[in-house]
Amino acid sequence: MGPLKGIKVVEIASLAPAPMGTTILADLGAEVVLVDRPNAGPGGSRTGDGNPMRRNRKSITLDLKKPEALEVLLKLCDEADVFVEGFRPGVTERLGIGPEDLAARNPRLVYARMTGWGQTGPLAQTAGHDIDYIAMTGVLHMLGKAGDKPQFPANLIGDFGGGGMLMALGILAALVERSVSGKGQVVDAAMVDGAAQLGSFIFGLRGAGQWNEPRGENLLDGGAPFYDTYECADGGYVAVGCIEPQFYAEFLKGLQIDPASLPDQHDRSQWAATKARFAEVLGSRPRAHWEQVFEGTDACVAPILSPEEAVVHPANTERAVFTEIAGVPQPVGAPRFSRTVSDLPTAPPSPGQDSDDILRSVGLSPEDIQQVKDAGALG
């Protein structure tokens, strides 16, 4: 089920960004064959058996140093719509499964390449991680409290937002274009490109002269008292985002603060004093009190939930935002569709658990399968 039903994807197992993008495709109904390394752990990665980045897939183990394994991979790609790899530039070419190699056999194949720095440029062969990619794009410089060092939001911007999600978008765009041209193409997905794109809005504000204060002193980075987080009496926190005047008025009403007792909402010279006032009031009651006060209002106040709390919060359970797979709570696929409804995610496969079925699917006889195994191609 799902809008991508019938789309076949071959994915070389890797960490974080590429699996995020492929999970999006799988959640939307694509049939994904995951090519695991022979010595992968029980869950295929450090996250264990319930790894959300492996769900909705079938797994085969292949030792790509063996010619028999490469031949199996080539047969899989002959029938595939999408191929996904996350090696450094040039690795697949050396293995004989580069874009030209696969396009010669399957001209309709969309070949997605996920890297940190892209296939070209002075850093293309250099190692890096999420924190490095967002550092080099100017995005990390914008994040953090006033007077403090830059603070990075785990590995969400480079790996997953700028990496996996943009890769999935690129694949979908290439599939749409293929429906017209009949030809596949290479999708060069780089986390540095995606991270920069995620910063477009703030770059626009800077260009308009609306984001020129130091880090943590601007409208949307914690500088404004009406767009920040506050600690409550019990140690919990709430997030406040009442930018618009009507929402700000609702917020002050909930705090029981007379608007006449405060300076103008956008008087930057008084932001520190206003923030101190809000902190005093919000800090006088537990988080549950403020949840009750602001529930159902347009004050744009939300409790800052832990992951455990988020899974069981009524707002999320009623919409079924989360599910549980192999004992691991995790988000369901998104977005949602009115007609081609996606199935609930299936449990991640153990590495190689579907090897025989996958080998049969590419036309190998029992004797051929045994020869592949005897050659050590499956590890």
Image (cartoon, helix red, strand yellow):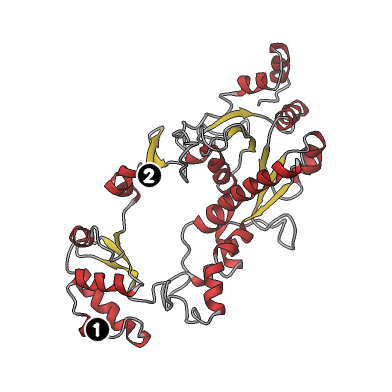
Q: Kindly give the residue lying farthest to the top in the view shown.
A: 367
Q: What amino acid is labelled 1 in the image?
A: Leu
Q: Is 95 on the left or on the right of 294, as rendered?
A: right
Estimate the x, y position of residue 123 in percent, counting from the top left.
71, 61
Of residues 257 and 369, which is closer to you in this image? 257
Q: Is residue 149 visible?
A: yes
Q: Is residue 90 above or below residue 286?
A: above
Image disc number at residue 126? none
Q: Does dot 1 land on a helix, a strand or a loop?
A: loop
Q: Is residue 174 above or below residue 349?
A: below
Estimate the x, y position of residue 223 in percent, counting from the top left.
39, 76
Residue corresponding to mark 2: 321
Residue corresponding to mark 1: 262
Characterize the local packing of mark 2: few (<14), some (14-19) or many (20 or more) Cα atoms within 10 angstroms: some
Q: Is residue 283 visible?
A: no
Estimate the x, y position of residue 290 in percent, counting from the top left.
21, 62
Q: In whole angstroms, how far apart are the C-alphas of marks 2 and 1?
A: 39 Å
Q: What amino acid is labelled 2 in the image?
A: Val
Does label 2 or label 1 sit earlier along the sequence? 1
Q: Is residue 52 above or below residue 145?
A: above
Q: Is 290 on the left or on the right of 347, as rendered?
A: left
Task: Please tell me which residue is depicted at 48% across the width and 63% down the height of the picture.
Answer: 152
Of residues 57 and 316, which is closer to you in this image? 316
